[in-house]
Image (cartoon, rainbow, N blue to C red):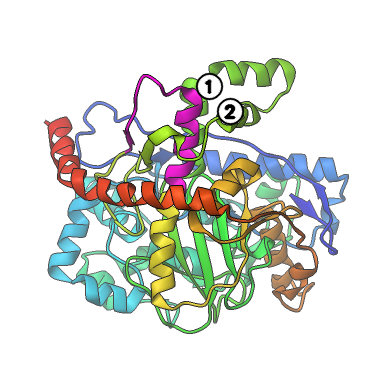
């Protein structure tokens, strides 16, 4: 996206890339696989930059700064020549289970939480790096640095394999989140080489300039400043105006991420803590993170929505709009169909590598629309589980909850979230999501903006969803069943993983 100094979006472009989940021959390990080819990141960044500049009819020399955000965490090993040595295993990947068991036994969860404000889980990139060392020692030995998904294209732009405070906090485990630095002693206790960890910078700090080679690939001018960047949800929160303590936003992308900004270093167990993009030297965000939110409906579209996809190709009708229309005719509660949304394991608050999706109560009376709505409601129940823990911690949360990206574009899904959480929600209609946040980060980094407050004047909240009392009462009854479902099947998940492994 190319944005003017006063917040006008001048040109955009969007590219999807696939997810590798199928294990190949010889890949016999517990835990789900979830990978991307790192070059997909670079090609997507380079191509979207080129097209966005062209669509904006902008002179590349007028572009004052560049910033990138992406999913996080990820683990990409690069050699001395900055070439990738393997596919990125992303946050969804759950293979580092044994490494996390080792950390719990030899380091302890309390010590890790006190340092990083985060739990021990395969989600965090430090655990993924340990897996690489244990399972692909030759690749690990040849590693110069490891990178996240945002770091990699930044490295391709500048030639510098570094990271930012937000991504570092999700590399996790050995990151001192209060002092914003790596704990080298703990890294060595983990059997890792501190030199392989990327140097961490404030999100809006200039880390380098676009190289001549990167300029030819992207259409940017050589020498254009590149700032460190951030995590995708963090950038989206900035775009939605969440730049001060108490700001509460829900990003409904592939994952569902509910974040609350705060300035005190007080942290909530079983939640994720991330350094916030806005004033990354001082602010934090406590967040609840569902592994699958928008991914649930995308899975339905890609697996069962062939007619909708064909209609989109031939008639230009959005496939998601057609899927939403089908679910609109289903009453709240989906006629007793309840979904556990753990299709790729789950993060907050259960942190279960082996958890998987469940459709409970399925009958011959249920149709496609019931399944679609139940997927949306399952994500809502997952968010409520987290929301209740956040409320209990006493953290200040300003209302309405601001919704953005992906599933937030569905009026029906927004209403489902409002009804289940029993709070007012509003759509950040003027926000283009994370890319706007990135542009603001770039603007602060190169001195165009004094601070992040500028974005508040650009955000327009609309499409307010007020909770329906009757719907909420129905959802409370179903939520009680939802909460009992996971404990009832938890042990079966482990047995299932073992059976598949055999």
Q: Position of residue 52 (x, y in %)?
A: 77, 43
Q: Is residue 288 visible?
A: yes
Q: How many marks?
A: 2
In this image, 291 relative to 222: left or right?
A: left
Q: Is residue 361 part of the magenta span, yes or no?
A: yes
Name the residue carrying label 1. Answer: 305
Which one is in front, 417 or 67?
Answer: 417
Q: In this picture, which residue range is highlighted in magenta? A: 357-380
Q: Position of residue 81 (x, y in %)?
A: 47, 51
Q: Nearer the viewer, mark 2 or mark 1?
A: 2
In this image, 437 relative to 150: left or right?
A: right
Name the residue carrying label 2. Answer: 323
The C terminus lies in which quarter of the figure? top left
Image quarter for residue 62?
A: bottom right
Q: Position of residue 294 (x, y in %)?
A: 52, 42
Which one is in front, 324 or 186?
Answer: 324
Label of residue 417 in the image: none
**Residue positioned 24% across, 77% down in the render:** 111
**Residue positioned 18% across, 71% down in the render:** 107
Image quarter for residue 407?
A: top right
Q: Mark 2 or mark 1, which has the lower sequence index?
A: 1
Q: Please determine whether, in this image, residue 371 is positioned above or below residue 208.
A: above
Which one is in front, 174 or 218?
Answer: 174
**Residue positioned 32% across, 32% down in the render:** 361
Report helix, strand or loop for mark 1.
loop
Report how far apart the C-alphas of labels 2 and 1 lie in the structure.
Answer: 8 Å
Q: Is residue 463 part of the magenta span, yes or no?
A: no
Contact (Cβ within 8 Å) of mark 2 with mark 1? yes
**Residue positioned 67% across, 28% down in the render:** 318
Report helix, strand or loop for mark 2.
helix
In this image, 196 relative to 166: left or right?
A: left
């Amino acid at each position: 996206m190319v944005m003017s100094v006063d917040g006008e979006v001048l040109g955009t472009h969007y590219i999807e890339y696939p997810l590798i989940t199928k294990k190949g021959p010889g890949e016999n390990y517990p835990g789900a696989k979830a990978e991307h080819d790192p070059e997909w990141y670079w090609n997507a960044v380079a191509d979207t930059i080129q097209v966005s500049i062209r669509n904006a009819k902008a002179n590349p020399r007028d572009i004052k700064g560049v910033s990138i955000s992406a999913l996080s965490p990820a683990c990409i090993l690069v050699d001395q020549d900055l070439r990738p040595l393997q596919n990125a295993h992303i946050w969804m990947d759950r293979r580092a289970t044994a490494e996390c068991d080792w950390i719990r036994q030899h380091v302890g969860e309390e010590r890790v939480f006190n340092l990083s404000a985060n739990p021990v889980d395969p989600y965090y990139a430090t655990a993924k790096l340990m897996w690489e060392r244990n399972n692909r020692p030759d690749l690990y030995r040849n590693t110069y640095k490891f990178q996240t998904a945002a770091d990699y294209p930044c490295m391709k732009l500048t030639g510098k394999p570094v990271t930012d405070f937000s991504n570092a906090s999700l590399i996790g485990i050995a990151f001192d989140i209060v002092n914003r630095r790596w704990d080298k002693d703990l890294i060595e206790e983990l059997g890792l080489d501190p030199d392989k960890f990327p140097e961490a910078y404030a999100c809006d700090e200039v880390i380098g300039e676009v190289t001549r080679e990167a300029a030819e690939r992207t259409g940017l001018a050589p020498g254009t400043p590149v700032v460190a960047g951030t995590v995708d949800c963090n950038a989206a929160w900035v775009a939605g105006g969440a730049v001060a303590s108490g700001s509460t936003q829900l990003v409904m992308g592939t994952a569902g991420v509910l974040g609350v900004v705060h300035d005190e270093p007080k942290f909530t167990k079983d939640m994720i803590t991330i350094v916030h993009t806005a004033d990354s030297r001082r602010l934090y965000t406590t967040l609840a993170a569902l592994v699958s939110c928008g991914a649930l409906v995308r899975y339905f579209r890609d697996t069962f929505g062939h007619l909708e996809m064909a209609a989109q190709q031939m008639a230009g009708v959005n496939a998601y709009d057609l899927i939403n229309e089908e679910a609109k005719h289903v009453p709240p509660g989906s006629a007793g169909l309840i979904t556990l949304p753990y299709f790729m394991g789950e993060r907050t608050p259960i942190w279960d590598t082996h958890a998987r999706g469940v459709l409970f109560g399925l009958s011959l009376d249920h149709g496609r629309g019931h399944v679609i709505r139940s997927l949306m409601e399952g994500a809502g129940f997952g968010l409520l589980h987290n929301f209740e823990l956040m409320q209990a911690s006493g953290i200040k949360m300003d209302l309405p909850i601001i919704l953005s990206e992906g599933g937030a574009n569905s009026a029906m899904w927004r209403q489902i979230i409002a009804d289940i959480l029993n709070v007012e929600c509003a759509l950040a209609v003027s926000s283009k999501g994370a890319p706007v946040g990135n542009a603001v980060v770039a603007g602060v980094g190169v001195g165009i903006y004094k601070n992040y407050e500028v974005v508040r004047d650009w955000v327009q909240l609309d499409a307010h969803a007020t909770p329906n009392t009757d719907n909420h009462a129905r959802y409370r009854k179903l939520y009680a069943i939802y909460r009992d479902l996971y404990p009832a099947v938890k042990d079966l998940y482990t047995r299932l993983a073992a059976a598949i492994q055999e």
